[in-house]
Image: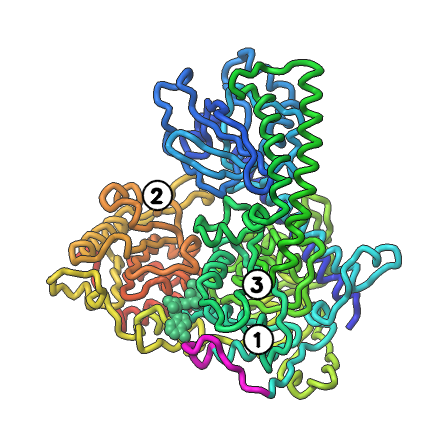
Amino acid sequence: MSTERVSTFIDRHLFLLSQERDSEVEKTSLVFSKCGPKLLEQKGLALNGLGIASIGVGLGNKTLVELERPAAYHAITVFPPHTFRPGDLASIEENVVSTSRSKKSTKLTNASVRDKVKSAAEGVVYKVSDSRIIIAIDPSRSDLGDFEFPERCRVLKLANNITYDRKVLAVMMESALKQLKIIVSPSQSEAVEAPKRSRLIEVLLGMAMPSRSNITHDVSFFDVSLNDSQKTAVRFALESVEVACIHGPPGTGKTHALIEIIRQLTSNTPVNPRPLRLLVCGASNLSVDNILERLLALPAPSQGTRLVVTRIGHPARVIQHEGALNSTLEAQAERSDEAALARDVKAELETALGVLSGKRKGGKMLRGSERKRMWEEVRTLRKEYRQRERDIGKSVLQESQVVLATCHSSGGYQLRAQEFDVVIIDEATQALEAVCWIPIFKAKKLILAGDPKQLPPTIHSLLASKSFATTSSTGSHKNLSGTTNPVPQHERIDSDDDERDCIDTDGGSALEAPGPTSKIASRFRYRGLTPPRTLELTMFERLEKMYGPGIKCMLTVQYRMHAKIAEFPSKVMYDSKLITHSSVATHLLRHFPNIITTSDDDILETPVVFFDTAGCEYFEKLDGDGDEGSRCNENEATVVHNWVASLVAAGVNPSQIGILTPYQAQVALLSSRLRLLYGPELEIGTVDGMQGREKEAVIISLVRSNDKREVGFLKDERRLNVAMTRARRHLCIVGDSSTVQHGSKYLKDWLAWLEDNADVRYAGLD
Ligand SMILES: Nc1ncnc2c1ncn2[C@@H]1O[C@H](COP(=O)(O)OP(=O)(O)OP(=O)(O)O)[C@@H](O)[C@H]1O
């Protein structure tokens, strides 16, 4: 296959990535240009008027800045309500009083000073209490230099914005793709820098067919409770030479299967004669921690030693469990023999920082050349501390058989020269293809796990790329960054569902199957490498499109939902292949061990309830400006409220109930009505935040009810699939069938199914 085709594919990716970056920048500047500090504080996105309580050094050489509301400025030193949580990205800035031209604010008219303040103090929320917040700043990433924290500061949340982390990620993704381009068509000078071209890379780019080896021995499974489809998936992963995709629909034990795969690959067995070294990644910290916790919970082996695992990642973002924290590279490094020397350097560093901040007891503020000298000392000590830390980190990693990290953090300096036999990426259907390439360069074999029928990665520039679809036929398209779309002008982007994700450049070409495994390779049908239409197309889905279903293995037994709850998603999203395990097939709220009620209300007996609001005129409302606004539905909220009350009265604990809705405005409305009554244990959220989780009872509020029969978000089958597969024993849907059924064939089929299978209640009458 021509390298030109691969180049077009990579260029298209780079173009879409730069479009995504532009779109994020635009969004960020919009929020921050519209809101002043006061409004940001009211929105819970800022804490104003803070003072520095202390500065120290924490795990991984992070500078820990502790801030409080000084009693001198505030009658109440407890923070107002806010949204800061450990792991959030935040910046420390000088407290600006935007309306007055006071002495303090004029200081900030000096743009360079302000820029310095902003860039110098971006970090991660490490701890929050009622009256103190600690921000961990990585000095290796920020130019703390001789920046002095102002007397009055504010902390600003950056989680939804293009932060330092996201910028770094964007650079990493772009550089991974550029490296890829060099690998496939090296020019002499560049080839020196790039990683080696491997069979794995060739297969992922359609330059060679995937192959499978025949396992001649029976696999002896560590976990005897695995079901047949899980065993098949484990065998499939072991047999695949370059790449294997594991498709795990909701509740099918994908993580169970991955743990077995990890155990098999790291053991010495007839099937796997050499224990391999693995890099286990996830799209999110949550997915990585989920695997980490399960690995830590494994029983000690009867012979040999325990698996040595190391978690890479910011300690504030790692799940706050002792075992998980002890597995971080930082914690392991701290326990190592070489750590004592580093600790001495750290103590010196802390003393110097204390002197400079004037916080050291009895110390006076240094000035002039004395101060300059002290900063030089801090810089030297930091350098020394970092070098010592790196050396210790390297020796810890050399001992680790399994390294866990998000795809993003696998690109950090800790893993720079590290090589692995296999990289596993969990939640791969929620990760951008470009982010997956970051760990892929480090290994020879790839295992992707995910469910392409659930939510894809969030893409901010999707609207922009849709408008691109209309402009590209008339001329070449440049985005804000000046990157040109590499797909030739004559390419057509049509809306056929099956072809929705790729731009068809030609029919693809036949590839030679590799010799020894050609029989197995013939299971794959090569359909060509096509440039992606949007970044929503993940590597998992692209490989399936490129090689057909032979590239993946699907888990088919689900352990979550009552059979009735699973029936519609199984039929429509999983070709009726999703089977319900007998242990959950008939489970109802009534059987739940904690339910102590004697109520004979059929609320506890019914797996699926549908409150149809058709004809009730429970119309939706737009919350916010124009089409950009979110939507809510007050009457629907009342139906939801009443149903929660009925469930709780029947003995269901609020913590066992989840309320899902596609609209943020409906989340806000429901929260304002139900939070005070049922506390934070009653979870109310958008569908996106609930992926990968479950509740005993789930209520879905569809919101859309209008004369125009507009359904917006509800058209998204994958979002609805996630919503309807979170409930274990009871699913209640509240919506207007007369609006919703006109949205798509999927919605029409769903409402017809509900009509036939659910306990249908008419909201106005009940
Ligand atoms: N072979 C099995 N036998 C019994 N229970 C199982 C088996 N495999 C998985 N389960 C149970 O199914 C549930 C889901 O398992 P797991 O968390 O591994 O699934 P998952 O597919 O990763 O979940 P998600 O749907 O959140 O992606 C768990 O309660 C687990 O104990």
Residue at coordinates 57% horizontally, 75% vertically from top-left?
237
Q: Is residue 82 above or below residue 308?
A: above
Please identify the residue farthest to the right as the structure is shown: 188
Residue type of the residue flagged with mark 1:
Ala
Location of ligand 1 given as a quarter of the image: bottom left
For label 2, the residue is 668
Residue range (magenta): 217-230
Q: Viewer-proximal residue, 85 or 493?
A: 85
Q: Viewer-proximal residue, 372 or 142?
A: 372
- Mark 1 or mark 3: name the one nearer the start of the chain: 1
- Mark 1 or mark 2: name the one nearer the start of the chain: 1
Q: Viewer-proximal residue, 422 or 618?
A: 422
Q: State the image quarter where residue 623 is shown.
A: top left
Q: Is residue 385 above or below residue 702?
A: above
Residue type of the residue flagged with mark 2:
Ala
For label 1, the residue is 237
Label 1 neighbourhood size at 10 Å, few (<14), some (14-19), many (20+)? many
Label 2 neighbourhood size at 10 Å, few (<14), some (14-19), many (20+)? few
